[in-house]
Amino acid sequence: MNITEKILAKASGKKSVSPGEIVDANVDMVMVHDLTGPLAVEAFKKIGIPKVWDNQKVVVILDHQVPAESVKAAELHKTMRQFAKDQNLTFYDVGRGGICHQVMPEKGHVTPGTIILGADSHTCTYGAFGAFATGIGSTEAAAVFATGKIWLKVPSAIKVNVAGQFQKYVTPKDLVLAIIGKLSVDGAIYKSAEFTGPTIKNMSIAGRMTLCNMAVEMGAKNGIIEPDEATRRFLEGRVSSLPDFQALKSDADAVYERTVEFDVSGMEPQVACPSSVDNVKPVSEVGDVPVEQAFIGSCTNGRIEDLRLAAEILKGKRVKEGVRALVIPASQEVYKQALNEGLIEIFSDAGAIVCGSACGPCLGGHIGLLAADEVCVSTSNRNFIGRMGSTKASVYLASPATVAASAVTGKITNPATLEAP
Amino acid sequence: MNTKIQAQAIVFGNNIDTDVILPGKYLVLVDPNELAKHALESLDTEFPEKAKQGVIVVGGKNFGCGSSREQAPLALKYAGVKCVLAESFARIFFRNAINIGLPVIECKGISDAVQTGDELAVDFEAGTIENMSNGKKFQVNKLPPFILEILSDGGLIENLRKRMNKK
Ligand code: SF4
């Protein structure tokens, strides 16, 4: 079996499972946020059970419309605050956590080998720690609140094998864009995407999270990476106990529907052009694209490693006149780290605005929306029509290095071509 | 739920994502009838008006890709969509639709066989789809019984209540 099958078999009390089989799995953790939580609460109340199945296994995080930008959003927050209190749940209020997918592993809610569900499509991020994690809707979350179980079809798997060393300013974001460009936005629909190979073994946890985060952009049910020493270093002190990683390795004879090979050695920075995440080109082929906004943040690329990279480029430079640069650390923890390392000062000196940890413009909810005909280069994960504001605006997705370089020149730019200050 | 549906088709292309089905800025709305007013407006501002009489949406590949927002299928359902047929669905959308009682059926070849305005007849139990306007017929994989049961109960919550009461 591969790692995903092993986790699903264990969670459903079976010796083995195979693709296509439907299993009834025990859930280890479920998360809802301010936009999916209220519907889940309403549905849960309709079921008519007074208490969630296990209050230690439900996490509520406010991160989307944060801080509340309207009375409507404030009402949603109030609903979630009350529910968390009534049910005695782990709750991250405004200013206490940050973006859900950063907060979950940071605060120790992600353990390798477990089943984690979230009422958010990018829940697949936690595959970076060797967990089976996938997104569900609000009604399904309510059903999990009530029963602690979910039916899942065992996915067939695609192995993505990655070799080679990244050039300077080429990052895991560029790799995942290249992968989606090759496999297409429905290339892994209903399937598991398992990332392996020497490049993944050497990759930071932050980079692995970026890869697994975007697995859903090619339709995958989950993205997953075998846990190793790097996983242990990140999680130690955050989770109460760690399982035996040996049981979380794919067998040598594990079956994959297909294997795709990537070599990052000669890879250029990649850009996903409007308005599909698989419309990917090497930056040299994107042409002359002036931008009005540059956004560095989101659950894809708002980690400290991402901010350091952006700061390295922005240090001693100015954001070009006519460009708004927004920086949003993914969590309070990342924010504080950036503050301690002097990164916030670098961004401010460069003329960027640094906002509080939240989703921000990523979903076009509030903060930094785009007007018609404006162009944004963004480190987030979706460039759909209307995603970041006007349906007539365009979004280009790229790495923190490319976005920072583009903020300086005012057009989409290969960071390697930017001169030293 | 009626296991047989007949209605006019409205056809969309590949990769219809949840941001075009229901933009993020409307997620603060709680009333499904309010959500419905914005269903698919990025592609066709008149869609909610057209859907009112009851329609079948036909999509290409990867229908409903993107966010986990259940407000997307809810907006379609309350706008008047009786059923969505597509070459393939994004998995969260597929589950969400069933969980809120909106039938969704995967049907290879459907997008080439239907034009907007065609009259379609769908039989869930038999797994058949017929385009009455051009006579084309499809036999699809039937939904598993437990999913049909969720749909006929009107959604997962009603289904769960029923099952829990039995215990
Ligand atoms: S940062 Fe963007 S993609 Fe991530 S959870 Fe928030 S809205 Fe979703």
Image (cartoon, coloured by chain):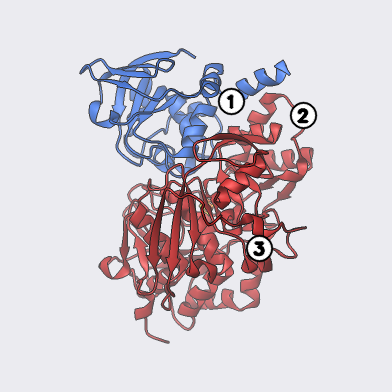
Quadrant hosting residue B12: top left
Q: Are marks 3 and 1 in contact (CB under 8 Å)?
A: no
Q: Nearer the viewer, mark 2 or mark 1?
A: 1
Q: Chain of mark 3?
A: A
- The nearer-to-camera label among 3 and 2 is 2
Determine the residue positioned at 62% across, 65% down. Answer: A228
Q: Which mark is residue A50?
A: 2
Q: CA distance from mark 3 to mark 2?
A: 33 Å
Q: Quadrant of residue B77?
A: top left
Q: In percent of the image, x 29 and y 17: which residue is there?
A: B130
Please name the residue that numbered disc 3 is placed on.
Answer: A332
**Residue placed under numbered mark 1 in the picture:** B156
Q: Nearer the viewer, residue A261 or A75?
A: A261
Q: Amino acid at mark 2?
A: Pro
Chain hosting mark 2 = A
Q: Looking at the image, is A207 positioned above or below residue B89?
A: below
Given the current orientation, which residue lies at the most extreme bottom position?
A421
Please name the amino acid that badge 1 sits on.
Leu
Q: Of the residues shown, which amino acid type is indicated by label 3?
A: Gln
Q: What SS does tag 2 mark?
A: loop
Q: Looking at this view, is A418 or A24 the one in front?
A: A24
Provide the letter of the chain coloured blue: B
Q: Kindly tell me whether residue B35 is visible in this rendering.
A: no
Q: Residue at point 44% right, 15% down? A: B125
Decide: few, some or many residues near mark 3? Use Cα within 10 Å; few <14, some 14-19, many ≥20. Answer: many
* Residue B67 x, y percent position in the rendering: 48, 44
Q: Is residue A303 left or right of residue A407?
A: right
Q: Tag 1: Cα neighbours inside 10 Å, few (<14), some, or many (≥20)?
A: many
